[in-house]
Image: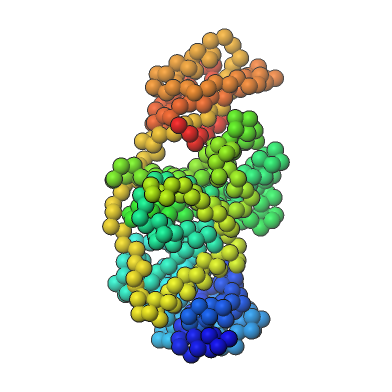
Amino acid sequence: MQNTKEAEKARTVKVGLIGLGTVGGGTLQLLAQNGRLIADRGFALHVKRVCNLDVPYTEAKIAELGLTDTTATSDFHDLVDDPEIEVIIELIGGIHPALEMVQAALRAGKSVVTANKDLVASHGAELFKLAEEQQADFLFEASVAGGIPILKALKDSLAANNIVEIMGVVNGTTNYILSQMSSTGADFQPCLQRAQELGYAEANPTNDIEGFDAARKMAILASIAYNTNITEDMVYVEGITKISKFDIDYAAQLGYVIKLVGLARPQGDEAAEVCVYPLMIPASHPLAAVNDVFNAVFVEGDALGQSMFYGRGAGSLPTASAVVGDVIAAARHVVNGTRGSYGLRQFASRRVLPIGDCFNKFYIRLMVQDKPKVLAQIAEAFADSEISLDSVIQKRVMDSGLAEIVLITHQVREANLQEAMGRLHRLACVDCVASMIRVKGE
Ligand code: HSE
């Protein structure tokens, strides 16, 4: 108690909060709930103003949390123009007007904390530069994998490593859907519907199921891991809408689990591979055990070796945990006079490899006519594109007279695989390529 009083007397950092949705509400709650504990760590945080369009709702929330010296406003200028406010938290999401608000806050000399992955994945570099010019902090731990402290780990604790690979299950909605498909045997649509009923997936689930949300997070992770400016539009993306229960079932029989995975790997000194796609991972891999809405980021550093960061990638308090952690860091820099020391200069310049130049092993499920010499023609189509097959499994003969063939290739250059797909489509004996999924392995 004595410590708290002394700390509060020593320094109180005033904070402004923009946005009072799920994460904003959790952030305000956490600051109220653990304010004393935070003060015991060296200085007090005082949320002076909360900016939210619905002022009566904001006032009610402030009262509910017992915050006596906090006011509500619907005008963010009331925060930016307040000389006492030193740290601004942006939690409205989306690009506009969040970008303009963050720019205004940084230009006014405030440090900024955000959970906004859309903003960081598209405008990160210019905001890092602006923060540096203003000697302010721009922190965004909550933008990737919610409460999991992966950005700070990459920026600080793993800074001595060459990051050989990052594999992330960084979208909870798709992980829930794939886990449900796997545990219940149901197909994609009913599992998506269940995710929507539970509030995991939004009414318009496109950003999650098409992989765009994961791509933004991978752009941010790769930018930090490789000190380079990688924006979301550079990330190759495939979502999970084409994964069928048959693929989940074959994967299990072959000893794999299908996950939507974000991958980042350096390729030499000047390039990097940054992708999001469904991947068959061996059932023994640590990421295979990451189920439901949980997230995990598997990192391999040349010095550390393999490690995995696991936890809740979304939700009010888990995300608030990362936001408030950043606010404490920003406030510490204010108190110690070291603002801006956490700058993210992107000194390197790696290009992102086009997907055609990447190498992967593939699972391919084909519907073919059940006749002699069909397998030979298929094998020839692959051989003509210089693709070597690891295994071929003819699994089912359908009532229609078609047979289902599952192939696993060795590592292939993706451009060669696309060429082979063209050859297969031209074969009269091939009815369709039902699925193509990348496989983790040599
Ligand atoms: N929609 C995201 C997910 C959470 O399902 O993981 C916010 O990034």
Q: Is residue 46 left or right of residue 244?
A: left
Which residue is more in the foreground, 299 or 354?
A: 299
- In the picture, residue 366 is in which quadrant? top right
Image quadrant containing the C terminus: top left
Q: Looking at the image, which residue is at 59% across and 79% down?
A: 32
Q: Looking at the image, which residue is at 47% across and 73% down?
A: 327
Can residue 14 be seen from the camera position used here?
A: no
- In the picture, residue 29 is in which quadrant? bottom right
The mark tally for this picture is 0
Can residue 265 be seen from the camera position used here?
A: yes
Decide: is 290 above or below 52: above
**Colouring scheme applied when the structure was drawn:** rainbow
Location of residue 367 in the rendering, given as x and y in whole percent from the top left corner: 58, 23
Location of residue 163 in the rendering, given as x and y in whole percent from the top left corner: 39, 49
Decide: is 282 above or below 426: below
Decide: is 84 above or below 113: below
Q: Is residue 229 left or right of residue 77?
A: left
Which residue is more in the foreground, 302 or 92?
A: 302
Location of residue 416 in the rendering, given as x and y in whole percent from the top left corner: 39, 28
Residue sitting farthest toward the top: 372
Q: Looking at the image, which residue is at 60% across and 62% down?
A: 315
Decide: is 210 above or below 384: below
Image quadrant containing the N terminus: bottom right
Q: Looking at the image, which residue is at 35% across and 55% down?
A: 160
Location of residue 189 in the rendering, given as x and y in whole percent from the top left corner: 66, 43
